[in-house]
Amino acid sequence: MKGGSPLQRTASQAVTEDHLAGGSLTAAISNAMVRVLHEYTGRGPTRVRTSIRDDIVTVLMHETLIKAEQKLIEDGKVDMVLEMRRCIQRTMRDDLVRTLEEITGRRVLAFMSDNHVAPDLAIEVFVLEPAGQNGSAGEGARADAPSDHPA
């Protein structure tokens, strides 16, 4: 998913840090994470909640598993599903990081991702370069209040 994918064009055209603050920023991040997940798995979560605190962005997604994964879990293959999800997350990493950097205008220093099957939750955690470093914006890229959006 490199280069000029529709996802990359949408994220870079849709939002810039200058236009976003607070709820608008968290909503833009939530929507972008849903688009990335949908592009890779064919569906997005039913609900997503993005929180930003200082240099940490967390994106919690509800009900991300596809039907085949749900059936594998019912058949006792939880470890297989979780390993497959780890592989998908590693593959999505570059698109997730690039998208977040475009939206916030800040460089991502670290990215962590994990899934849980019961309940069906996924979390993406991004550690951003401190505000004001490397030409990044200060307060415009920060929102302390979480937002909760249906996907």
Image (cartoon, rainbow, N blue to C red):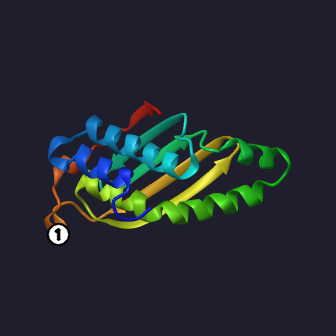
Please tell me which residue is depicted at 40% across the width and 65% down the height of the picture.
Answer: 2
Q: Is residue 94 left or right of residue 8?
A: right
Q: Is residue 78 above or below residue 46?
A: below
State the image coordinates of residue 79 (x, y, percent, origin top left): 76, 59
Q: Amino acid at mark 1?
A: Asn
Q: Is residue 51 left or right of residue 135?
A: right
State the image coordinates of residue 139 (x, y, percent, origin top left): 17, 49
Please tell me which residue is depicted at 63% across the width and 57% down the height of the picture.
Answer: 85
Please tell me which residue is depicted at 17% across the width and 69% down the height of the picture.
Answer: 134
Q: Is residue 67 above or below residue 148?
A: below
> How many marks overall?
1
| Residue 110 visible, this orientation | yes
Q: Who is closer to the viewer here, 146 or 12? A: 12
The residue lying furthest to the right in this view is 75
Say what secondary structure mark 1 lies in. helix
How many C-alpha atoms fall within 10 Å of the one at disc 1: few (<14), some, or many (≥20)? few
Label 1 sits on residue? 134
Q: Is residue 111 left or right of residue 22?
A: right
State the image coordinates of residue 80 (x, y, percent, origin top left): 75, 60
Q: Quadrant of the N terminus?
A: bottom left
Q: Is residue 86 above or below residue 39?
A: below
Q: Is residue 11 above or below residue 129?
A: above
State the image coordinates of residue 142 (x, y, percent, origin top left): 25, 48
Q: Is residue 151 left or right of residue 130?
A: right
Q: Quadrant of residue 118?
A: top right
Please tell me which residue is depicted at 48% across the width and 54% down the height of the picture.
Answer: 124
Q: Who is closer to the viewer here, 92 or 139? A: 92
| Residue 55 visible, this orientation | no
Q: Who is closer to the viewer here, 126 or 35? A: 35
